[in-house]
Image: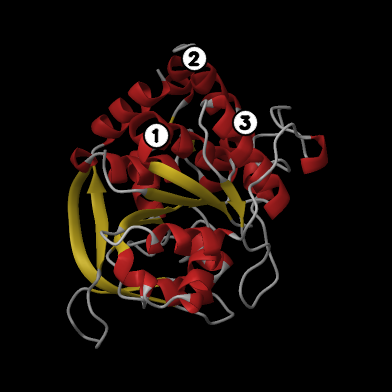
């Protein structure tokens, strides 16, 4: 067994597949999920997290966290993932009252703090959504950064090519103040930006059919829940299929062989309100006084990622 893992998610269709991979390969180490509003509102994201937990046969707490960014109104990505975040194909209910499951008591930020407090040797953190819960936890317990052995963030864009603005990736854009607080905290971060997903994790129709033919409940759901995302990626993002940002981020956390190239940098987040909102600004030349505590993944192995994905859904 490895170090305890806390996963924070705004559970929509790509998060769902990422959770499947984490549960498949590191299930005993995943101690809790935190849920944050982002891709969809908090209640729906919670329903989706609970659904995937049950689908994968896991027994772990799912804690609700922030229902909005630190300083801004919530702007979801339901136009990308569907109103229910899972492709609008009838996989999940849309109200907790209609779901056969319930979240665990306590705020996600407090659950993260409690897990870190009980493990002096440190824990691993994987974030798949806006960083609101993590920023709240750091505000309550600044020592938390020192208890994070490794933090994997799906967010940002190292090539400055965004998916919500010309230069910004959604998770960072949704709550840039929270993201700036996390990147400034000093914790050891690995950043897997949207550029990695766009270049190495696009699933075309033939590959999607092949994955679905694996025939497991997880494989079938993993493909079916991408219905809305597939249309968005083809019509708006101009990709030859749908991309899987969160799964390739989790694959990096699971398997170092997914990484081909990386570099260290200090990362700043623009909190301006115009075109640069949420832009990740990378300093890999020591031009600022912020430590280069972020390992930025710049190239990945598509072949290795696909192997992890197929094995994880089998």
Task: Indicate the quadrant where residue 286 lies.
Answer: bottom left
**First-in-chain label (1 vs 3):** 1
Element at label 2: loop
Reply above or below: 307 against 114: above
Q: Give the mark toward the camera: 1 or 2.
A: 1
Element at label 3: helix
Element at label 1: helix
Counting the numbered discs, the total is 3
Q: Which residue is mark 2?
A: 216
Q: Looking at this view, is 271 or 56 the one in front?
A: 56
Q: Is residue 276 visible?
A: no
Instruction: Please name the residue shown 20% across and 43% down the image.
Output: 256
- Residue 45 appears left or right of 216: right
Quadrant in the picture for the C terminus: top left
Q: CA distance from mark 3 to mark 2?
A: 18 Å
Q: Which residue is mark 3?
A: 227
Instruction: Measuring from the top left, give residue 161's x and y in whole percent.
Output: 41, 60
Sort mark 3 into few (<14), some (14-19) or many (20+) by Cα contacts within 10 Å.
Answer: some
Task: Indicate the quadrant where residue 298 lies.
Answer: bottom left
Q: Give the mark toward the camera: 3 or 2.
A: 2
**First-in-chain label (3 vs 2):** 2
Q: Which residue is mark 1?
A: 27
Instruction: Please name the residue shown 33% across and 61% down the image.
Output: 159
- Residue 21 appears left or right of 98: left
Residue extending farthest to the front is 118
């Amino acid at each position: 067994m490895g170090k305890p893992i806390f996963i924070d998610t705004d559970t929509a269709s790509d998060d769902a597949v990422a959770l499947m991979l984490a549960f498949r390969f590191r299930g005993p180490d995943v101690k809790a999920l935190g849920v944050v509003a982002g891709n969809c509102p908090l209640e729906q994201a919670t329903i989706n997290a609970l659904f995937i937990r049950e689908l994968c046969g896991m027994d772990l707490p799912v804690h609700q966290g922030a229902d909005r960014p630190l300083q801004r109104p919530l702007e979801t990505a339901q136009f990308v993932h569907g109103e229910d975040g899972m492709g609008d194909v009838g996989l999940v209910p849309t109200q907790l009252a209609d779901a056969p499951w319930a979240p665990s008591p306590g705020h996600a930020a407090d659950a993260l703090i409690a897990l870190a407090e009980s493990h002096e040797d440190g824990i691993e953190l994987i974030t798949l959504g806006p960083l609101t819960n993590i920023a709240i936890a750091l505000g309550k317990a600044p020592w938390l950064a020192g208890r994070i052995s490794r933090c994997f963030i799906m967010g940002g864009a190292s090539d400055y090519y965004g998916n919500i603005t010309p230069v910004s990736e959604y998770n960072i854009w949704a709550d840039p103040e929270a993201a700036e607080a996390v990147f400034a905290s000093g914790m050891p971060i690995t950043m897997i930006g949207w550029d990695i997903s766009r270049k190495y994790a696009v699933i075309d129709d033939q590959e999607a059919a092949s994955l679905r033919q694996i025939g497991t409940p997880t494989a079938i759901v993993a493909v079916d829940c991408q219905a809305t995302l597939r249309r968005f990626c083809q019509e708006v993002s101009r990709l030859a299929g749908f991309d899987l940002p969160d799964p390739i981020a989790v694959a990096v956390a699971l398997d170092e062989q997914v990484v081909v190239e990386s570099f260290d940098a200090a990362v700043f987040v623009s909190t301006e309100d115009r075109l640069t909102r949420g832009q990740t600004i990378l300093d890999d030349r020591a031009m600022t006084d912020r430590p280069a505590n972020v390992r930025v993944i710049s190239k990945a192995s598509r072949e290795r990622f696909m192997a992890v994905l197929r094995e994880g859904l089998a």
